[in-house]
Amino acid sequence: ILGDRYITINSPFFSNQSGIAVDPLTFQTVGQSNQEYSWYGYSRSVQFVNVPQTYLSWYVESVGAPNYRICKYKNCTYDEGDLQAGGQLSVFQDGKLIHQWTGASHFEELGYSSSVGYHGRFIAVSSPGADVKSTEAGIPVTLTQAGLVSVYYFPDKYMSKKPVLVFRMLGDRAYGRFGEIVRLQDVTGDFGDELIVSAPRRTTDVTEELNGGEEGAVFIYKLPEVGDQPITFTTDQAFKSFIGTEHNARLGSSIHVMRGNKSIRLLTGATTSSKYGFKSGLLHNFLLHKYQ
């Protein structure tokens, strides 16, 4: 709900408008995709922005289509050179499209989750299906579907210039799908956004074979000042880490930041936890910040 005037509804599997009744409401579409199976609207985030020292204000909205196919031909007829499920993220300013990103590899699923920062100038977008290059015992390896999160920044407050990549967070486990949920929110009470990233399918055991699997994890990163070059973060550089210990519980399946008068807490689901019943699920409550 945006203020008291707008209600936004995602329809990632939308096919046509038959049977839709919108009277007496005014139905307005903010962007759409004509590509079949693209899942436009699978993720979305919106912020109302007041521009400092001006009377200007607007809504900034990000909309993801993680199943979007990057086509070799303009008419998008199938070709073996197409990038399947590369993904796409669209950013709107008061309903006007101002920028789009597309994935660069097969099944990257860019746009699976996205988040607009408090002042609208930071955009976080995840690619949970992306492969990540890493090293193990000094040997270069490729972690399949480890996942990554990219943070972009609009250099000017009017958002008229092209956004630039400023931070990149990398997953550390094959098939961990780091970035299934991303959130830019203040969790320390300092009026600046931190980045929350969940990886509910992450396996805690680094060998990914000896003990359990899909315990899940949630990582929180402090974002430094924007520099001239992008900064890459590993999971070891997270400000806070919550690592699952229960086999197949998938900690980080859902995320909500709860603000109270005395503290800021993170609520995160482990939806397939069997601690109190087979696949019954569990909700964890973590203290992030306590006001003095």
Image (tube, rainbow, N blue to C red):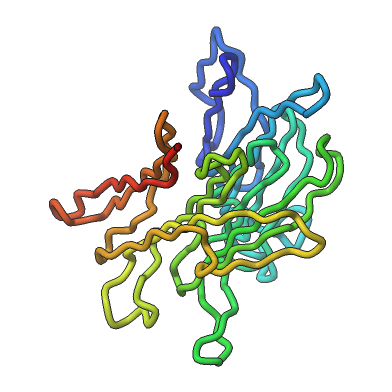
Q: Residue at x 26, y 54 (%)?
A: 272
Q: Residue furthest front?
A: 292
Looking at the picture, does residue 16 appear above or below residue 85?
above
Task: Count how many numbered circles sit on residues in the image.
Answer: 0
Query: Along the line of sight, which residue is nearer the eye, 79 or 38?
Result: 38
Looking at the picture, does residue 38 appear above or below residue 291?
below
On the image, the x and y values in percent for residue 271 come to 29, 50
Looking at the picture, does residue 118 appear above or below residue 246?
above
Q: Residue at x 63, y 32 (%)?
A: 47
Taking 99 as reference, is 5 left or right?
A: left
On the image, the x and y values in percent for residue 125 come to 61, 52
Q: Is residue 41 visible?
A: no
On the image, the x and y values in percent for residue 209 come to 32, 81
Looking at the picture, does residue 226 appear above or below residue 120?
below
On the image, the x and y values in percent for residue 229 come to 78, 64
Query: Along the line of sight, which residue is nearer the eye, 90 or 147?
Result: 147
Q: Residue at x 27, y 78 (%)?
A: 211
Q: Is residue 219 visible?
A: yes
